[in-house]
Image: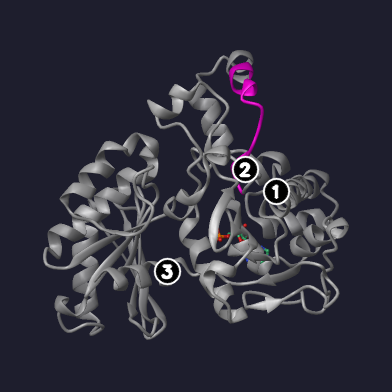
Amino acid sequence: MAVNAGSSSLKFQLLEMPNEKLITSGIVERIGMNKSIFMIKVDGEKNEETLDIPNHADAVNLLLNKLIEHNIIASFDEIAGVGHRVVHGGDQISESVVLDEEKIKYLDEIIDLAPLHLGPNLTGIKAFKKLLPNVKQVGVFDTAFHQTIAEESFLYAVPYEWYTKYKVRKYGFHGTSYKFITQRYAKMMGKDVKDVNIIVAHIGNGASLCAIKNGKSIDTSMGFTPLEGIPMGTRSGNIDPAVVEYMAKVKDKPVKEIMNILNKHSGYIGVSGVSSDSRDLVSAAAKGNHQAALAIEVQAKRIVDYIASYHNYIGGAEAIIFTAGIGENAKPTRANIGSRLATLGVEIDEERNDTRGVEQLISTDNSKIAVYVIPTNEEVMIARDTLSLL
Ligand code: AMP
């Protein structure tokens, strides 16, 4: 089972391994609020009910019992392992691990690095451990894939002690997605992972890019937190940090509130004033909304800045891969980014680019760098890593 526990939600997929067949999936939402929602897919049909689910332990209990009630499993013994998406592994965890007491203690210690996400992740892990004490729980970390990034790239040019004493450095996120794409691309090309030199643009509501050289992450756009990098659905991406103090002063608001605006009310929604969803922006822009069009262009410009820089840092990327909600689905966004990369010899093929949500080469045969769409699948990556540790 692949699990992604958030502060008030818990997403799950049950997969048959090693053939990676999806058995069922679902989500528990509004945990700890009234009218919680439990949804599970039974024979492909959504089965939803509203009830009160006070905490994560109750959510896990309900989910496990529903699997039996709907005849998806006959007993809990059929669940061989549970893989948890964990947002942060600090600088000690560079691969997926079995979550024993020592690892859980370490995660408790680094909780301040990602309090909004790591706390709920741990709550989910502890709930599963309690209810399935004999089943191995595995942590699959968003940061782990980026632990190969060299000091010159992960270090901020601030007092060195900020790094040694306070762990301030670039960690990077979306690592599970980048690992999946790297493995998938290698397989598609029939080559070894260590021969893969690519740039991956994971553009969803949260969005980042990764430079992959010899199959390893050498740089990524998100940083100490997911706020760094390109503008996203609601996040600003890079800004001059001096803006934070300035806006706190002129608005007479605490820094915390300014940070909340940078995380939740910036990016697409901040610039456009329309929506954080790319589909809404595309249709508003088509009707002549200047700010909606601008929000798209501001992001595309920054994405291209990263791609050009990563192409150089890799020493020549063989391919650029688009993935996640926008990367997989938004043809005009891919075409726009492609045309901004013409000086690197990138050429998008209009017909090939007319695709959504499937693996596809979208560049012309003349393009100096191949461009692909490859749908990501973090849950499968979690299940693979879990299986390999059982
Ligand atoms: P994710 O966070 O990966 O689920 O991606 C969410 C983003 O993907 C949202 O901004 C959606 O608007 C975007 N998205 C999904 N489908 C499409 C589509 N057909 N065209 C453009 N954007 C899409």
Q: Earlier in the sequence, mark 1 or mark 2?
A: 2
Label at residue 229: 2
- What percent of the width, then of the height, locates residue 287? 83, 56
The residues tagged by marks 1 and 2 sit, at their Cα atoms, a distance apart of 9 Å
Residue 151, image x, y percentages = 52, 39
Which residue is more in the foreground, 213 or 184? 213
Which of the marked residues, 2 or 3, is nearer the chain's N terminus?
A: 2
Residue 168 shown in magenta:
no
Residue that numbered label 1 is attached to:
306
Crowding near the residue tagged with mark 3, few <14, some 14–19, many ≥20 C-alpha atoms within 10 Å? many
Tell me the amino acid under the disc marked 3.
Met
Q: Are marks 1 and 2 in contact (CB under 8 Å)?
A: yes
Count residues near mark 2 (Cα–Cα under 10 Å), then give few for <14, some for 14-19, many for 20+: many
Question: Quick one: SS at disc 3?
Answer: helix
Cα distance between the residues tagged 2 and 3 = 24 Å
Residue 144 image position (x, y, % from top left): 42, 53
Q: Amino acid at mark 1?
A: Tyr
Q: Which residue is mark 3?
A: 381
Do labels 3 and 1 touch, CB within 8 Å?
A: no
**2 and 3 marks in contact (CB < 8 Å):** no
Disc 2 marks a residue whose amino acid type is: Gly
Q: Secondary structure at mark 1?
A: helix
> Is residue 238 on the magenta stretch?
yes
Calculate the distance from the C-alpha at mark 3 to the C-alpha at mark 1. 25 Å
Name the foreground residue: 339 vs 236: 339
Q: Does residue 134 show up?
A: yes
Q: Tell me if 234 is positioned left or right of 129 in this view.
A: right
Quadrant assignment, res 277: bottom right
Which residues lie in the magenta part? 233-246
Can residue 53 be seen here? no
Residue 349 percent location from the top left of the image: 83, 74
